[in-house]
Image (cartoon, helix red, strand yellow):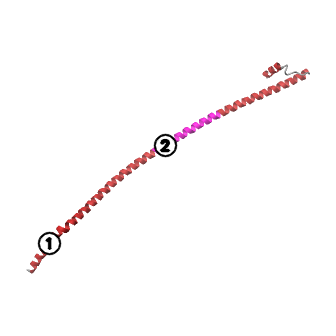
Amino acid sequence: MNINATLIAQLIVFLILVWFTMTYVWPPIVKALDERAQKIAEGLSAADKAKSELSNANKRVEEQLSAARTNAAQRLGDADRLAQTMIEEAKTRANEEGMKIVAAAKAEAEQEAMKAREALRDQVAALAVKGAEQILKREVNAGVHAELLSRLKAEL
């Protein structure tokens, strides 16, 4: 009987321990486990959300980079076209300026040629007068014969 009474006493103590554990110890442990499970679930949810946001942010960054590259390429193209236009305009202006310089040089050369012809005519007229003096053995007066000399210049 001693074994039975000990067994019953141990059973009563065990039941008291189970009741005490279930009443006072088990609820805080279950509560802690539930809170831990909830925190883990929230952490996983936050990680998924952050991963989704990171993916969206990467897409936006790629779109912005693509737009920036397109914009930069367009600006470079515009700059190249502007540079080509400026070069063409500069060439045109340089050609026009060169043509003006050539025309001015031609005009100046023409004037110099006219001056040289006039000087040559004067010299030929003077030589003709001297030659006529020699032939006529007398002096020819240039003032008196101005009309004759001007006709001679015009013929030359």
Q: In the rendered image of this protein, does residue 63 appear above or below residue 13?
A: above
Q: Which residue is mark 1?
A: 16
Q: Which residue is mark 2?
A: 75
Residue occupying the point 45% across, 46% down: 69
Crowding around mark 2 (Cα neighbors within 10 Å: few <14, some 14 to 19, many 20+) is few
**Closer to the eye: label 2 or 1:** 1
Magenta includes 94? yes
Q: Amino acid at mark 1?
A: Ile
Q: In the rendered image of this protein, does residue 31 appear above or below residue 86?
A: below
Q: Main secondary structure of the magenta part?
A: helix
> Residue 45: percent from the left, percent from the top?
29, 56
> Residue 17: percent from the left, percent from the top?
16, 72
Q: Quadrant of the C terminus?
A: top right
> Residue 102: percent from the left, percent from the top?
67, 33
- SS class, disc 2: helix
Find the magenta span and give its range: 71-99
Residue 117: quarter of image: top right
Q: Amino acid at mark 2?
A: Arg
Magenta includes 25? no
- SS class, disc 1: helix
Residue 140: quarter of image: top right
Q: Earlier in the sequence, mark 2 or mark 1?
A: 1
